[in-house]
Amino acid sequence: MATVHPTAAVERAKPRLPRHPLSLPRPPGVPTRGPKQETPALPSRSLRIVALGGGTGLSAVLKGLKAYAAPSGEHRTNDPVVDVTAVVTVSDDGGSSGRLRRAFDMLAPGDIRNCMVALAEDETLLSRLFQYRFPNAKGLDGHSFGNLFLTALTEVTGDFHQAIQLSSAVLAIRGRIFPSTLENVRLQAELETGRRVQGETRISRVADKIRKIRLRPRRCAPVPETLAAIAEADLITLGPGSLYTSIIPNLLVEGIPEAIARSGAPIAYISNLMSQPGETDGYAASDHVSAIHEHAGSALLSVAILSASPISAAARKRYAAEGARPVKRDVLKLMKLGVRVIEEDLAASGPSVRHDSARLAQLLVRLARRARVRSVGRE
């Protein structure tokens, strides 16, 4: 049972909305929870969820949501289909992506590729092909096939955005993927010491606390389809993922934070389970929310999603050796920031401390569905 903390007082979660003839399918392995009760029927159109971020955190969200989305071109009449849109940061300058950016003066393909694989209709041959990395091959070592494929399509079409859509069609992804901007942006961090650091790779390794993050150039336009998706969303999510190098960069693109604020949809931050060495040392969940609000220019978030799953002593010790520690769930401070707090068991089993994609997706779909019911009631 989830624990929900409203902004005014701490209380137990209200009963979850039940399944009804038009309720959403439940992914395998996710238990049924909550008592049944009458709820309004939903209109026939898809629930629309827009997920912003980058890196493996966004991929985990998309992989879970894929279970609720119909294959491209297929319409299911028995269940409402979730329309998934991923908005991805493109400022990575390390590894294969960085080398391709420098060689071809293009946007970073790596996070886009990971999102495609996460939303792919199947994760067998084509998905494995896109993730394949060439080992010990002169000039190709470290490059993934998917990055090279996106680069080649960009060169052939002259359009990175079109290359993404064509690649998405090849993988038959269950959703849409848009870069937050099509301009060749780079990150700059201002540290508490006053020093400025250029480039995502260098920023992720800094030892000093980050005061501010910026895009270079500062003025960069969003992809129009991103703004349209945000305007129609039933739920917008940020995270999990690297705060300053995966989540916040999306909010620095002109027009995106304003579009999110105007959308009327719940804006949910999915808190990281562990701190990121160097980037968020000592950060509690409220520090993440405060940083997002500061960079967005307004108190954008309405919901904070925290995992209540215990982290074993062995895992804590192993992560501490690398400088990472559990993110503190400071519920009262979050409530003072004006966000509703939801705590639920969201961690996956296994040695790695990470979110369970299926459980997280179940919660997100439930939030989107409740938001739709409320919006229908206001119409």
Image (tube, grey):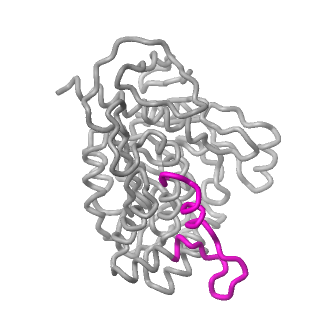
Q: Residue at x 32, y 70 (%)?
A: 220
Position of 363 with respect to 84 (left or right) is right
Residue 242 among magenta residues: no
Position of 160 with respect to 26 (left or right) is left
Q: Residue at x 27, y 39 (%)?
A: 264
- In depth, the one of 62 and 299 nearer the eye is 62
Position of 317 with respect to 222 (left or right) is right
**Which image quarter holds the C terminus?**
top left
Residue 144 among magenta residues: yes
Residue 309 locus on image (x, y percent): 66, 32
Vertical position of residue 222 compared to residue 338: above or below: below
Residue 102 locus on image (x, y percent): 50, 84
Q: Is residue 357 visible?
A: yes
Q: Is residue 198 visible?
A: no
Q: Residue at x 72, y 47 (%)?
A: 352
Residue 25 locus on image (x, y percent): 45, 31
Span colored in magenta: 119-148
- In depth, the one of 130 and 189 nearer the eye is 130
Q: Magenta region's main secondary structure?
A: loop
Q: Residue at x 39, y 62 (%)?
A: 169
